[in-house]
C-alpha cells in the first residue's frame, strides 16, 4: 500500500458526497449526463488568482499559460482576471483572441511555429516569442508581406537551469529559445529588420515546489535580461521570467510557499525597477492557477478479485487522464490523490487498484490505494486534475468516446 496524500480540503463534503461549485457530485453527474468528465470550479480558480494578487508585488503582470487548460469557457472566465495570455499554437491563439484579450497582452511562444501561424499571429498583433534566428527572419518576411511590423520578444535559453523543477526547460542544449551567448548577435540582426522589439522571455522549468529555487531562478533571469538589454535595438519594455510554480500531486509533496516566492519577487522587482523602470515584469503561470480547481470523474463498472487483490474497474482511464496514469513524463509511477466521490467519509475502507477499460496494464488510476469500498455506479474522483488533463491525453487510443468538461 502506498502512503496517503495530505488531506484534500479544496472542496466541501455534504452528505458524504463531494461538492463542486455548490453542487453535489451525484447531482453534477446527472447534469453532465454521462461519465467520465472533467469538472473545474470557478470559485477555486478565482480564489487562487485573488491570493496571488494579494501576495505578489503590485505592478507585476500575471499571465495565464493556456496550454495547462485551454477549455474555451475557462479561458474566457480568466480573461478579466489576468493581465495576459501565453499561447503555444495557432489553436490556442484563436482561443485567446476569442476572449477579447488585447493582442499586445498575448504572447506566442514555442519552437516550430509554422509560417501560417506566424502570419496569423502577426496579423493579430500578438507578441511573438522568437525561438530562433530562423524564426526571426521568417517573422520579418511575414511582416513585410502584410505591411505590419511584428511585435517580438526573444526567448532566451540561459546558461543556468531551474533546480528541483519537475520538468526542466532551460540550461544546456535545448530546443527552446536562443542560447544566451548567441543573443547579442541576434539582436544586432533584429535591429536591422522591421521588427518591433518588446523584450525577453525566459522559461526555466515547470512543476517546482521549492520557493528558494524559484526565487533564485527569477533573480538570475532578471539579471540576464538586464545584461542582454544592453545589446537590444530598443528599450526593454517586457521581461517575461516564466513561472514554473508547482502543485503537490503525490504523497509527501508539500504546497509551494507562496509568501516566500512573493518576498523573493519583491526584491527581484526592485532590482529591475532600479535599472529599467519602464520594463514590465511578467509572470506566466499555467497549472498553478487551474490544477487544484479541477477533478476528473469516472464511474465504477465492476469489482474484480484477482489473487486476493481488489480491482475497481471504471469507465475512465489513461486515454482521458494520461498524467494520473503515470505516463506523462513520470519516471516512477505514483498515485494522484483519488477518492470515491460519493463515499467521502463514511463506510468501510479497503485497499484497491483502480483501472480503466483499456487493454493495457498502463491503464491505472490508483495502484493499491486505501479507498472507501466502491460499488458499481459509484464515482471515482481524481483530484489535482485541472491542468494537463483532457488535452494532454491520447483520447483516440482504443476508440472510446472522449470525456466531457464542465465549468461550475
Ligand atoms: C508550459 C509552459 C508554461 C506553463 O507551465 P506550467 O507548469 O503549467 O505553469 C509557461 N510558459 C511556457 C513557455 C510553457 O511552455
Image: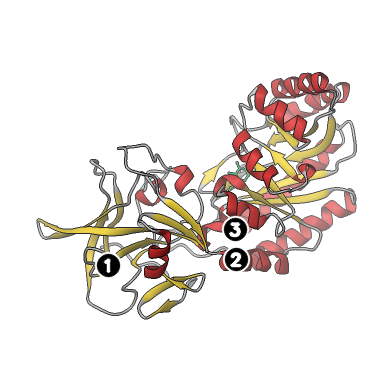
Label 2 environment density (alpha carbons within 10 Å; few <14, some 14–19, many ≥20): few
| Residue at screen point 76% across, 21% down | 142
Ligand 1 lies under 8 Å from the Cβ of mark 2:
no
Q: Nearer the viewer, mark 1 or mark 2?
A: 1
Q: Quick check: 166 left or right of 307? A: right
Horizontal and vertical percent position of residue 311: 19, 57
- Which of the two discs, 1 and 3, labels the residue nearer the N terminus? 3
| Residue at screen point 38% across, 52% down | 324
Ligand 1 lies under 8 Å from the Cβ of mark 3:
yes
Q: Quick check: 344 left or right of 219? A: left
Horizontal and vertical percent position of residue 253: 46, 62
- State the residue position of label 2: 257
Residue 104 quadrant: top right
Residue 93 sits above or below residue 79 on the image: above
Label 3 environment density (alpha carbons within 10 Å; few <14, some 14–19, many ≥20): many
Q: Report, in whole angstroms, how far the alpha carbon at label 3 lies from the one at label 2.
A: 15 Å
Q: Disc number at residue 370? A: 1
Q: Describe the element under mark 2 as helix, strand or loop.
A: loop
Amino acid at each position: 500500500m502506498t502512503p496517503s496524500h495530505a488531506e484534500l480540503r479544496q472542496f466541501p463534503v455534504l452528505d458524504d458526497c463531494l461538492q463542486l461549485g455548490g453542487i453535489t457530485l451525484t447531482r453534477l453527474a446527472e447534469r453532465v449526463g454521462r461519465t467520465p468528465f472533467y469538472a473545474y470550479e470557478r470559485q477555486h480558480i478565482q480564489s487562487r488568482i485573488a491570493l496571488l494578487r494579494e501576495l505578489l508585488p503590485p505592478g507585476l503582470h500575471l499571465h495565464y499559460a493556456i496550454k495547462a487548460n485551454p477549455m474555451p469557457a475557462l479561458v474566457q472566465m480568466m480573461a478579466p482576471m489576468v493581465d495576459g495570455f501565453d499561447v503555444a499554437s495557432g489553436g490556442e491563439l484563436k482561443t485567446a483572441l476569442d476572449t477579447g484579450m488585447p493582442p499586445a497582452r498575448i504572447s506566442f511562444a514555442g519552437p516550430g511555429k509554422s509560417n501560417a501561424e506566424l502570419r496569423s499571429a502577426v496579423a493579430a498583433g500578438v507578441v511573438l516569442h522568437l525561438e530562433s534566428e530562423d524564426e526571426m527572419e521568417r517573422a520579418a518576411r511575414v511582416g513585410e508581406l502584410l505591411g505590419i511590423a511584428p511585435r517580438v520578444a526573444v526567448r532566451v535559453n540561459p546558461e543556468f537551469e531551474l533546480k528541483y523543477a519537475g520538468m526542466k526547460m532551460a540550461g544546456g542544449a535545448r530546443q527552446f529559445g536562443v542560447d544566451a551567448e548567441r543573443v547579442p548577435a541576434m539582436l544586432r540582426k533584429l535591429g536591422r529588420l522591421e521588427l518591433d522589439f518588446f523584450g525577453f522571455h525566459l522559461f526555466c522549468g515547470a512543476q517546482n515546489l521549492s520557493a528558494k529555487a524559484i526565487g533564485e531562478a527569477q533573480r538570475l533571469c532578471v539579471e540576464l535580461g538586464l545584461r542582454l538589454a544592453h545589446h537590444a535595438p530598443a528599450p526593454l519594455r517586457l521581461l517575461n521570467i516564466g513561472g514554473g510554480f508547482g502543485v503537490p500531486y503525490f504523497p509527501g509533496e508539500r504546497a509551494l510557499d507562496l509568501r516566500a516566492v512573493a518576498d523573493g519577487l519583491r526584491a527581484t522587482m526592485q532590482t529591475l525597477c532600479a535599472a529599467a523602470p519602464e520594463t514590465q515584469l511578467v509572470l506566466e503561470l499555467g497549472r498553478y492557477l487551474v490544477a487544484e480547481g479541477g477533478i476528473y470523474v469516472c464511474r465504477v463498472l465492476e469489482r474484480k478479485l484477482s489473487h486476493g487483490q481488489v480491482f475497481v474497474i471504471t469507465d475512465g482511464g489513461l486515454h482521458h487522464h494520461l498524467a494520473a496514469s503515470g505516463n506523462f513524463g513520470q519516471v516512477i509511477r505514483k498515485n494522484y490523490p483519488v477518492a470515491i466521490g460519493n463515499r467521502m467519509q463514511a463506510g468501510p475502507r479497503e485497499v484497491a487498484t483502480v483501472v480503466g477499460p483499456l487493454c493495457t496494464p498502463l491503464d491505472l488510476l490508483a495502484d493499491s490505494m486505501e479507498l472507501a469500498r466502491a460499488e458499481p455506479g459509484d464515482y471515482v474522483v481524481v483530484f489535482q486534475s485541472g491542468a494537463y488533463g483532457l488535452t494532454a491525453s491520447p483520447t483516440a487510443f482504443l476508440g472510446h468516446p472522449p470525456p466531457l468538461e464542465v465549468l461550475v
